[in-house]
Amino acid sequence: MRVVSGIQPTGNLHLGNYLGAIRNWVKMQDDIAASGEEGSECLFFLADLHAISMPHDPAELKAGTLEMVAALVACGIDPDKSVLFNQAQVPAHAELQWLLTGTARMGWLNRMTQFKDKSGKNREGASLALFSYPVLQAADVLLYQATHVPVGDDQKQHLELARDIAQKFNNDFCEDDAPVFTLPEPYIPPQAARIMSLRDGSAKMSKSDPSEMSRINLSDDADTIMKKVKKAKSDADALPSEAGGLEGRPEALNLVTIYAAITGKSVEAVLGQFGGEGFGKFKPALGEVLVETLSPISARFRELKEDRESLDAILARGAAKARERGARTLDNTYKALGLVRG
């Protein structure tokens, strides 16, 4: 089992990133490492090549990449158990993307909803990188012969495209018994919590929200976490005793969901504990469990963030491993296409 997944280095992670993805990355890493199965591993990368598909500040991208490494390691990603690297240090990602553009079809890319969403009404003014972004995503996973790729609802379409590209390439250029690419399967992580804004229960928690009070950053200290939770939007009614009672109450549902996710309990169990109570009692309890879980992460993050040498070393070691893992696939792709290399 080879799991490959990436995240854009947009700076500090928040609670939604942690509960929605990173915590499951750590669990996958630990489970695969504990299995002891030869060849099984996780590869996690910072998608800095993807980041340049949109307008960006080079200095912010560089700083965000290092900050993201610190955050991932603080959350439990172990560079000795997983391969942790950034795309830019592994040129094979960009090489393979170009080789796959001969197989990918315009019609396939025209159907990608993310391009339509990100380009908005100015599709003609969007970068070519944004349009071909899904082909680079395909290269990201096919390069390492990924067997499984963690996906949310917004990425299922891109994984399907990667499988289509791999299948067509294998059909067009390979013998039946010697395909170049493995077709990756989607991995739907268990208990992938969907965490919403603390200011609007109908919007996802996001770094792009201008209000710092809308999210809990993994760099927040204990006092800041408690302050944000106590000021989080809620309503005047007491918590119900059953999950059905949260219908039509998005802010209440969000706060209960966060409590359930951070403690590993079900929403029903949380309501069994706090049903009938008001938010004056529930919010402090939520703040306490968040502080208990996030304070060690926050402390480790701040420590790592100041150690540039260690962060550079982590990325360099991970990139060396990644280049080694992807070399054979890249060579076989060139050969299958009839390209002559020195």
Image (cartoon, rainbow, N blue to C red):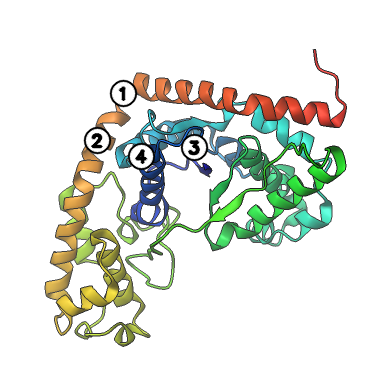
What amino acid does circle 4 point to? Ala
Q: Nearer the viewer, mark 3 or mark 1?
A: 3
Report which residue position mark 3 lands on: 40
Packing grade of label 1 (10 A; few <14, some 14-19, many >=20) is few
Residue 312 visible, this angle: yes
Report which residue position mark 2 lands on: 300
* Location of the C terminus (image quadrant): top right
Residue 232: x %, y % from top left: 26, 67
Residue 251: x %, y % from top left: 32, 75
Whether pointer 4 and pointer 2 mark residues with C-beta atoms closer than 8 Å, the reply is no
What amino acid does circle 3 point to? Ser
Q: Please state if 145 lies on the left or on the right of 61 as rendered.
A: right
Q: Please state if 333 lies on the left or on the right of 81 as rendered.
A: right
Q: Secondary structure at mark 1?
A: loop
Residue 233 visible, this angle: no
What amino acid does circle 1 point to? Asp
Q: Nearer the viewer, mark 4 or mark 2?
A: 4
